[in-house]
Amino acid sequence: MKSFKLATVTLLVAAAALSTSAFAKDGTYTAQEVGRNGAVKVQVIVKGNKIESVKVLDWSETHPVADLTQTQLIPEIVKYQTTNVNNISGATLSSFAIKAAVNKCLKEAGLDVKQFQKPAPKPAHYNDTVTEDTNIVIVGAGGAGLSAAVAAAESGKKVILLEKNGFAGGNTSVSGGCFNVANRNQDHLTMSEGQKKIVEGIVNQKPLNPLHAELINKVKDQWTKYKESGSNKLFDSPELHALQTWKSGDNQANLNLVYTLTKNVSGTMDQLSKMGFVWRGKANQFVGALWPRSNRAENFKSGVGYVDTYLAYIKEKGLPVTLMLNTAADDLIVKGGKVIGVLAQNKNGRKYVINANDGVILTTGGFSANVKMRNEYDELWGKKLGKNTPTTNLPSATGDGINLAKKAGAHLTQMGWIQLFPAGDPKTGATSFKLGENSCIYVNRDGKRYVNESERRDVLAKANLAQKDQLFFVISSAKRALVDKDGRNAYGVKVEDILSSGKSFKADTLEELAQKAGINGKNLVETVKKWNEFCKKGTGDEMGRPTCMDDHRLDEGGPYYATLMTPSVHHTMGGVQINEKAQVINNSGKVIPGLYAAGEITGGIHGTNRVGCNAVPDALTFGRIAGLAAAGK
């Protein structure tokens, strides 16, 4: 009887295998699934009942974050003949989409999908320790880290650049990439009466310290000469940039650091140009930027352009920079009060002792993705920045470098000041779904404006949170939406994916737009009418905006976009205290020898509120300063 049962089971298994083979067809199959930013279309070639190849045909996923799904996840699917492979950290939704699309292709080919679900072998694990010697160790390969690496390497120093993610770029790679700098690409802009009043208010401020007085006097002299010239072009200067930045942070930042940034950022812009970065040529005013000095790339989408430019330059010039991915810093090596290296560990378990002859630079970013730290330090939002509050940041923005520096005796400053980005995706917090500038007009469900959209970001965030369900719409013109010839927005996301997601609506008329989005149509038409009148006259905006920029215009007719938004955690203004040379300061107010920091890990540059488009200049400029200082320049 037992022999009979065994024979029966054997026959059934054989029949199942025969059935799979009989219906499986060699060929090329395509399928798609929704990833993070939209549809992910995959091609699978099946041959001899096996997966011969997998290829992504089209997607809008974020570069470089999702790139590892193509260079690592897909090869593992083919190698191990299974879709049960590990997701790529930071690109989970992209990973799910690829695996689901492959499964669809397998099913269409007549294969039994369950036979392609066996777990892939676990990656090799090591228990050894490797010692490396170099001149400078940089922890964090985002914009600040890459800028520091180039500066140090061009000064003749060997650099080891550690990055805990599997890709370089950090939050710079997923940022909008806007870049504030005074007196650059502003020739097309004219001065409005509202902007004149702003400058008059700044030059008539009461000085609060000697540097404040010096900057006010410089701007006052510049303003006098400007008026005497009879020019109607936009007025600007590094000193005005510094004063606006300081005031926007409620005068709480270190004004010396602020001025160091604004007077050196133009040089950063020039350096990027020499490296192959092409600027758009026309500055604009992005959300929370306060003045039309925001620049962006012509040849790249979003902030990833800075990352790609630095990486390409390092490769092209053969700079002595070793990039170690998937390698997290566990501790700083301190001897006699001096930081002399880093203890690190790769995701495969291998440990590293990295000795740095000239210093260590921390460029690990902030802690926007660390819910525990957010609510431990928060002083602005009632400690309500819990797990249900989305963030624009990568999941890896967890404050690791801040904790390393603190352990080494660094003084932390202004940690309680956390910025919410006024206009993020309601589900993910991302900014990549925008259609048009986030400084276009905002309306609520009633179709009414409720805030001056050129205000500080904290003012905008609070106003947006006060709307029903904490949701609002950004209204923009399709003609001004920065959509390229391939139908992709400023982040490279396909417009059709954004529209199909229900996060944005498009219509030829405002009435139709209102109906699709669930907005009061009568009020929306009246709101846009008033806005168009202001754009025509240049004065009298109902919310007090000083000017109407070209990208904010709605008077050219449809189509129009209405994009649903909510505030999300964006930037942590506090962090490690540094001086103008990017040297880290301890709790006694003294420099910690051998330790430098740049970018969002630092505090004291932005005060209570960061000016929009000051983050990337901050990271890249102080990154360069740190690299040069560590190299002894």
Image (cartoon, rainbow, N blue to C red):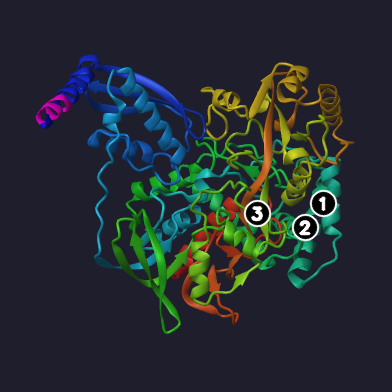
> In this image, 397 relative to 292: left or right?
left
User: Would residue 465 be found to the left or right of residue 544 on screen?
Assistant: left
Ranked by sequence position, the earlier of labels 1 and 3 is 1
Using the numbered discs, state the Cα–Cα distance from disc 1 to disc 2 in whole angstroms: 9 Å
Q: Are marks 1 and 3 in contact (CB under 8 Å)?
A: no
Tell me if residue 592 comes above or below residue 384 in the rendering: below
Position of residue 314 relative to residue 628, above or below, is: above
| 3D distance between C-alphas at marks 3 and 2 | 39 Å
Residue in the picture at 33% in, 68% down: 354
User: Label 2 amino acid?
Assistant: Val
Labelled pair 1, 2 in contact (Cβ < 8 Å): yes
Which residues are the magenta region?
A: 3-9
The quadrant in which residue 279 appears is: top right
Front residue of 429 and 142: 429
Image depth: mark 3 or mark 2 in front: 3
Q: Earlier in the sequence, mark 1 or mark 2?
A: 1
Q: Which residue is mark 3?
A: 385
The residue that mark 1 highlights is: 199
Secondary structure beneath disc 1? helix
Three-letter code for the amino acid on which mark 1 is drawn: Val
Residue 127 among those drawn in magenta: no
Which of 72 and 583 lies nearest the eye of the viewer? 72
Magenta residues: mostly which secondary structure? helix
Lower position in the chain sequence, tag 3 or tag 2: 2
Front tag of 1 and 2: 1
Question: Which of 319/415 is in front?
Answer: 415
Secondary structure category for the residue under label 2: helix
Q: Which residue is mark 2?
A: 219
Locate the N terminus by quadrant.
Answer: top left
